[in-house]
Image: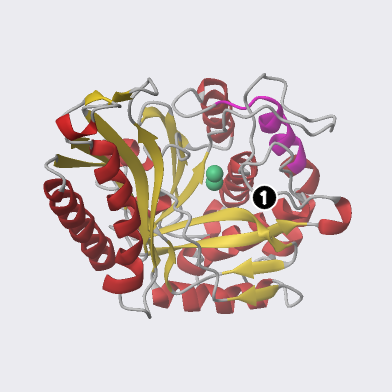
Amino acid sequence: MKPSFKTEAEAMRSQLVEWRRDLHQHPEIAFEEIRTARFVAETLAQFGFEVQTGIGKTGVVGILDGDDVGPTVMIRADMDALPIEEQNDTQYRSQIAQRMHACGHDAHTAIALAVAKMFAQKRSHWKGRLKFVFQPAEEIGQGAKAMIADGVLTQMRPDIVLGLHVWNDLPIGYVGITEGAAMAGTQRFSILITGKGGHAALPHQTHDPVVAAAQLMSAVQTIVSRNLDPLLSGVVSITQMQGSDAFNIIPAQVMLGGTIRAFETFTMDLIKTRLAQLAQQIALAFDCEATITYENSLNPLVNDPLVARRLRECFRQVDASLEIIDNIRTMGSEDMSEYLAVVPGVFFFVGSANAERGLNYPHHHPKFDIDEEALVIGASLLASAVAEYVWQQE
Ligand SMILES: [Zn+2]
Ligand SMILES: [Zn+2]
């Protein structure tokens, strides 16, 4: 008989809250997760895990084998915080200036540790291998890539990857599992338009890159409205513009920066191609030149449909009072996508907002906080998802 992970998670409620609040008070940003990684490594070692540290700079991997051979299940939690000054007035508020767990990664770390503990205590009842991956630097989109570069998907290759995010866009009691693309791929770009600068009073002597940039910014709005299939989704946002420092100088160069979001790689490619064409040809029309640079891309986050369906059914069995929904999609991105691009699996959303208690500020807001019941729900669901693949039939 599979145990009730709902009961087990409820029994760990105070432990979950204690871990999460301790992490919340000691937030560390991307690739600076020293204290967090040490805490995770020590806790996993106490549970009997074989622990590897320094994977992807500050990441931690914990390995535990079950009673028999079987699948390798990877559980991913992110550990990093944000450079934000917390404005909450709780007794567990951040103790570090300009550092805050404003996305809930403290909750993810606590939940994954709770699941690790549950399975460590039941080693004779499951088969296969559990690989807990505590990742740094999700917020800058570099932690997953760093851990993959250090072999996290090739050494003891996982057969399935599981992860979750507490989600303040959903009230507590709601859980979102989407089949297919759930979060957008992202591509940062910068466009350098080079013309001929000069005196603002003598524009006829210049090739003004500011005017070319203005035309380009308008034209870019047509990519989604005119080039993209209306049944698909995409975003192109230009968010940065740098020209001259002085009111009376026409600059020689203008830099435009921004981001592209899309759910499919081919949509991303279409947008990138059109952006480059528009930049080069509009620049040319104004006797300027444009060069476009792409950096920091992330894949769309795509859930395996079979795994998503199976876990949705599993979650209904865990707790019939949960509202399981299947259509949560966001143009936000998450570097969990990098693992899911290689290994099948699921990333699901655990509703964590509670409007009555004022716990419904959005992620990355200085007053962000969660209903901590999401810790219990998250641990019960993640443990049940793991058990779905490794529990021994008796
Ligand atoms: Zn975030
Ligand atoms: Zn996050």
What residue do we see at 79% from left, 34% from top?
88
What residue do we see at 64% from left, 56% from top?
167
Q: How many marks?
A: 1
In this image, 333 relative to 168: left or right? left
In this image, 188 relative to 108: left or right? left
Q: For label 1, count other residues whose C-alpha is less than 10 Å away and answer few (under 14), some (14-19) or many (20+).
A: some
* 295 vs 118: above or below: above
- Identify the residue under disc 1: 362
Asked which colour scheme the image uses, the reply is: secondary structure
In this image, 34 relative to 199: left or right? right
Instruction: State the extent of the magenta-drawn residues as a range.
Output: 17-28
Name the image quarter holding the N terminus.
Answer: bottom right
| Residue 27 highlighted magenta (yes or no) | yes
Q: Secondary structure at mark 1?
A: loop
In this image, 193 relative to 372: left or right? left
| Amino acid residing under circle 1 | Pro
- Residue 93 position, x and y percent, is 77, 29
The answer to whether any part of residue 51 appears in the image is: no
What residue do we see at 39% from left, 24% from top?
247
Q: Main secondary structure of the magenta part?
A: helix
Name the image quarter holding the C terminus.
Answer: bottom right
* 222 vs 51: above or below: below
* 360 vs 313: above or below: above
The answer to whether any part of residue 176 appears in the image is: yes
| Residue 90 highlighted magenta (yes or no) | no
Instruction: Find residue 71 and report its image quarter.
Output: bottom left
Q: Nearer the viewer, residue 121 or 26?
A: 26
Q: Nearer the viewer, residue 173 or 197?
A: 197
